[in-house]
Image (tube, coloured by chain):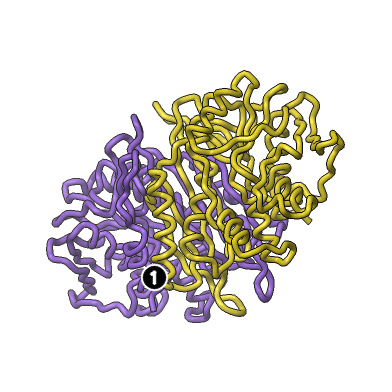
Chain colours: A yellow, B purple
């Protein structure tokens, strides 16, 4: 079973609570309180899976919060508070000071203070302690009735993505030896892997323009697949329109496709909007200081069709990251 | 450094957010939204530290939520929503179904639906995968301006605790061979360790009666110490008044003291209330279906004094659980 099946099968017990809510299986849960809607997201990062134990502590602190802020961005919510549960192999004060500095710097930049949490020691294993484990929960604010989900894409909508895709995956490929990069290129793609910039300002301004949104964390094809499934639609995506850095464009075409379409860890916003909003989307992106690219079109017929420059279908060897794929 | 020093040193960056809040270092953060106050708590549980990998999956699901509901109980908040981040060594469907059943049963009983979360695979270690790791975040509701914290105890207040203390620690002692129990006694104390019952109804009714509250998770002496420090007061605690089960009372006095005063994992409510509220406290406890015991008195002079039946001071070998104590 895959991760998405697991979530659907065991954790979508029908909500029966006093707070009206939506969004199980979305980037954020949206909860309606008197006078305000809040968005909540929660992500776990484990050393050896989402980062390496010897990565810079500041980068780990940054990334743990950034991936959660990216979920708020996808909902169009304004970040308001974060919580940290930290499982530490040992109490290394120098490491903690640097980790906290990385987390607080991003929290301050987004007005999202750390309001609580939990620290615990990872238990001894056969060889050394268990891996460093971080779980961050973020709370964001939305006007009543507003907020983007994966479920609103409609036939005829434009398909958009922010920034450039595939550099984080290229950094992983370089680390594993699957790609060879010069020192400057390596620094550039490592920054995309280690220091993702959540598109919070863009997400907030898309709230009244977009029909659906998701952040690209598992890979463009996989995350687009989530939107299509939840919205009950299909899409045509033009590979030549997928934005890639000059570093990635210097790589072989097959690696470019794998990184940009199935790589993940991009933390860009993938969203849909009616064609009449094109100018408004571009203006919103400019105001947020982020480029946006139009990738294709939503259609009524289910499925995802990816076309190359000649209009021929591209078949992907893999669609994206699934923790439990066999 | 100890866990509490770590929290204070690196994670109490002054909050600078748009939502007024209090409670960093408390059981819950209290956040004031327009028209409602919410309480938020977040705890991480790791196999080998907070439970054993081969404990019943239902019990693990129950406990992961129970320890968080206990934090809401200590704030006097009504549970409203929970979120789960789950790091799994493998995708074992039978295990997941039982884990989810345990969690959902307690969530349903408290009107606290699971609204979102994250599943990830723990990375490979030298021998097998990393340990099962759970992080639960709970959200609760309070009337504006209300909510209990550790900071309100005043000289002259009575010191109270719910239920009985020390059985969970006795179960751990039995597991390690430090105590020998018959089969029925073992079942009884194991239930206290594996299936703690958060005192949610009691906490809610104490909201307008108590001056401070905390849940007993690290051990009575340690948790009372947190209240005294945050409230700037001291206390006299009478050891004979500490409520213990008949199973624990059958053990040697030294083990009783260690389990009931320093054991932890009790998830009972420790709280302070003015002496004039005695009858109201007892009535509230009766309505909530939980016994409460009066343990001692808050005094102005700092420090915790524990007295035996003869009025002599008891010195503790250890005060409670600290993950990073050296």
Quadrant, the C terminus of chain B:
bottom left
Chain designation of label 1? B
Quarter of the figure with residue B284 = top left
Quadrant, the N terminus of chain B:
bottom left
- Above or below, A237 relative to A88: above
Q: Which residue is located at x 59 percent, y 42 percent?
A: A163
Residue placed most toward the observer, B322 or A148: A148
Residue placed most toward the observer, B253 or A274: A274
Measured from the top left, where is residue B204 in percent x and y? 35, 42
- The residue tagged 1 is B322
Q: Which residue is located at x 76 percent, y 30 percent?
A: A234
Q: Which residue is located at x 67 percent, y 55 percent?
A: A169
Measured from the top left, where is residue B195 in percent x and y? 52, 57
The answer to whether one can see residue B290 in this image is no
Measured from the top left, where is residue A15 in percent x and y? 57, 36
- Above or below, B88 relative to B274: below
- Above or below, B321 relative to B279: below
**Which secondary structure, mark 1?**
loop
Q: Which residue is located at x 36 percent, y 71 percent?
A: B2
Residue placed most toward the observer, A274 or B194: A274
The answer to whether one can see residue B123 in this image is yes
Q: In this view, does A309 lie to the left or right of B166?
A: right
Quarter of the figure with residue B133 = bottom right
Measured from the top left, where is residue B144 in percent x and y? 30, 35
Q: Is residue B133 left or right of residue B90?
A: left
Q: In this view, does A182 lie to the left or right of B167?
A: right
Total count of labels? 1
Q: How crowded is mark 1: few (under 14 residues within 10 Å), some or many (20 or more)?
A: some
């Amino acid at each position: 079973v895959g991760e998405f099946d697991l979530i659907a099968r065991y954790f979508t017990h029908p909500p029966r609570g006093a707070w009206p809510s939506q969004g199980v299986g979305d980037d954020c849960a949206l909860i309606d309180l008197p006078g305000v809607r809040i968005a909540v997201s929660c992500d776990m990062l484990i050393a050896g899976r989402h980062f390496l134990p010897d990565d810079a502590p500041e980068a780990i602190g940054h990334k743990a919060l950034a991936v959660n802020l990216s979920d708020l961005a996808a909902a169009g919510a304004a970040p308001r508070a974060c919580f940290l549960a930290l499982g530490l192999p040992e109490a290394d004060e120098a490491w903690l000071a640097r980790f906290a500095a990385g987390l607080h710097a991003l929290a301050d930049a987004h007005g999202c203070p750390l309001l609580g949490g939990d620290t615990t020691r990872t238990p001894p294993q056969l060889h050394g302690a268990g891996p460093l484990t971080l779980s961050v929960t973020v709370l964001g604010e939305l006007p009543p009735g507003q907020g983007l989900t994966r479920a609103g894409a409609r036939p005829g909508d434009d398909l958009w993505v922010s920034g450039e895709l595939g550099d984080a995956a290229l950094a992983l490929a370089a680390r594993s030896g699957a790609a060879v990069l010069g020192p400057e290129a390596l620094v550039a793609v490592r920054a995309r892997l280690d220091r993702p910039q959540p598109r919070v300002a863009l997400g907030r301004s898309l709230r009244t323009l977009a029909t659906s949104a998701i952040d690209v964390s598992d890979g463009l094809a996989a995350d687009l697949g989530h939107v299509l499934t939840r919205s009950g639609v299909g899409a045509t995506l033009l590979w030549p329109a997928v934005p890639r850095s000059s570093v990635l464009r210097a790589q072989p075409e097959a690696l470019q496709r794998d990184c940009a379409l199935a790589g993940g860890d991009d933390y860009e916003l993938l969203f849909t909007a009616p064609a009449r909003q094109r100018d408004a989307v571009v203006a919103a992106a400019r105001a947020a200081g982020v480029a946006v690219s139009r990738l294709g079109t939503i259609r009524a017929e289910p499925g995802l069709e990816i076309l190359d420059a000649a209009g021929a279908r591209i078949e992907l060897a893999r669609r994206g990251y699934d923790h439990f794929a066999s």
